Amino acid sequence: MKILLIISALIAVLAIAGLAWAGHRGICGHGDLVEHVAKRISHRLDLNVEQTKELQDFAEQIRGQRDDWAARRSQTRQEIDGLLVAPTLDRERLMALIDERHQDLNTRVRDLAEGFADFSDSLEPEQRTRLAELIGERMTRPWGPPRWVH
């Protein structure tokens, strides 16, 4: 059961990060998709004030990471463009860029997992079960938006 909860939490973090990315890119028509999803989760789980604050803190963390990620992506893109226009490809610098990105991604995912864990720890067992069900429903629907987002 504990393993299932950990896996569900990791999936949730990845799903919410994906939703944050989609909202940032304008793919979904809800404006700030992170806020939209947070409101829907709050409604579906019937969160109290403290739990809603934890969820809002997590949503704010996602937004901050999203903005930082976009800035870093632009910087990395410029560095890669510089490497590609050079007469020879600087393989060492390319590998260093890849390593930096992997390390940055690993740090960000761990931070998001910690934020999600803080929110998850604030939930009652019934709410945690319902959240796992919502995440499971989303993960089994390969096409279209999840039912609980609308």
Image (cartoon, helix red, strand yellow):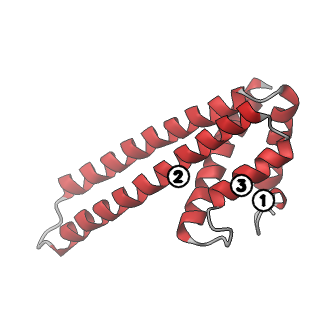
Circles 2 and 3, Cβ within 8 Å, touching? The answer is no
Amino acid under disc 1: Val
Q: Position of residue 65 (x, y in %)?
A: 47, 49
Q: In this view, does 131 lie to the left or right of 115?
A: right
The residue positioned farthest toward the left in the image shown: 87
Q: What is the quadrant of the N terminus in the image?
A: top right
| Left or right of 147 on screen, residue 79 | left
Q: Earlier in the sequence, mark 2 or mark 3?
A: 3
> Is 143 situated above or below 67?
below
Tell me what residue is drawn at x 72 percent, y 27 percent: 122
Q: Image quarter for residue 86?
A: bottom left
Work out whether residue 135 can be spotted.
no
Q: Residue 53 carries which label?
A: none
- Which residue corresponds to mark 1? 149
The location of residue 8, given as percent across then percent down, is: 73, 39
- What residue is rendered at 13% in x and 69% in y? 88
For marks 1 and 2, the one nearer the N-term is 2
Q: Name the kind of residue labelled 2 in the image.
A: Arg
Give the residue number, with chain letter if any, for mark 2.
63
- Image quadrant holding the C terminus, namely bottom right
The span from disc 2 to disc 3 (Cα, nearest Å) is: 12 Å
The picture places residue 75, in percent across and down from the top left corner, at 29, 61
Give percent across and percent down for residue 34: 63, 55
Query: Upstream in the sequence, badge 1 or badge 3?
Result: 3
Density class for disc 2 (Cα within 10 Å; few <14, some 14-19, many ≥20) is many
Residue 37 has which mark? Answer: 3
Secondary structure at numbered mark 1: helix
Q: The residue under label 3 is which amino acid type?
A: Val
Q: Is residue 3 above or below residue 20?
A: above
